[in-house]
Amino acid sequence: MLNSLTYSADVFSLVEVVCNPVIEPIKKTPIGLFGCPLGLLGLTLATLHIETSTGTTHAAGGSLLVLTVTVFCLVSVAYLVKSTCRPAAARADWLHPVRCNF
């Protein structure tokens, strides 16, 4: 019983650290920001296709792929922080008829 209380107290203290006012801009992350990695992914796939069809090395395509995955992870973490600190705002994004499509 004591361990579960300690664990829940640790989770609450972690949420307080994440929801610190210092990271206020991250908590305002728009859901439309997920479009950036999708655009980068399209560029990456086109570059990889061009490199494959011309028989060149995949240096540029591989670098773009690493950049795309990095941007996607950063946007995902930022939106996770938003959904942890402002669950009502994240829920409103998903329920909005236009914002949920982007």
Image (tube, grey):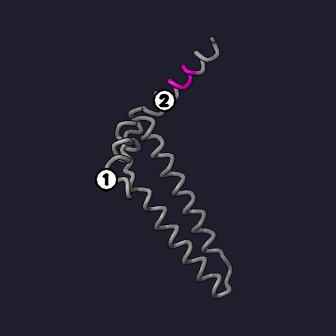
What residue is shown at x 56% (from left), y 77% (from top)?
47
Question: Which percent across, then down, holds residue 93?
Answer: 35, 47
**Alpha carbon distance from label 2 to label 1:** 29 Å
Q: Residue at x 54, y 77 (%)?
A: 46
Compared with residue 49, is residue 23 higher up or lower down, i.e. above or below? above
Magenta residues (range): 8-13
Label 2 amino acid?
Answer: Val
In the drawing, does residue 26 fall left or right of residue 68? left
Q: Is residue 58 left or right of residue 22?
A: right
Q: Secondary structure at mark 2?
A: helix
Q: Which residue is mark 1?
A: 97
Q: Secondary structure at mark 1?
A: loop
Residue 11 is a magenta residue: yes
Q: Which mark sits nearer the N-terminus, 2 or 1?
A: 2
18 part of magenta stretch: no
Quarter of the image containing the C terminus?
Answer: bottom left
Residue 100 sits above or below residue 10 on the image? below
Q: Is residue 96 shown left or right of residue 43?
A: left
Q: Nearer the viewer, residue 22 or 13?
A: 13
Do tag 2 and tag 1 residues touch (Cβ < 8 Å)? no
Q: Which residue is mark 2?
A: 15
Neighbor class of circle 1 (other Cα within 10 Å; few <14, some 14-19, many 20+) is few
Give amino acid for label 1.
Answer: Pro
Q: Quadrant of the N terminus?
A: top right
Can you give x and y, in whole percent of width and height, for residue 28 in the image? 36, 44
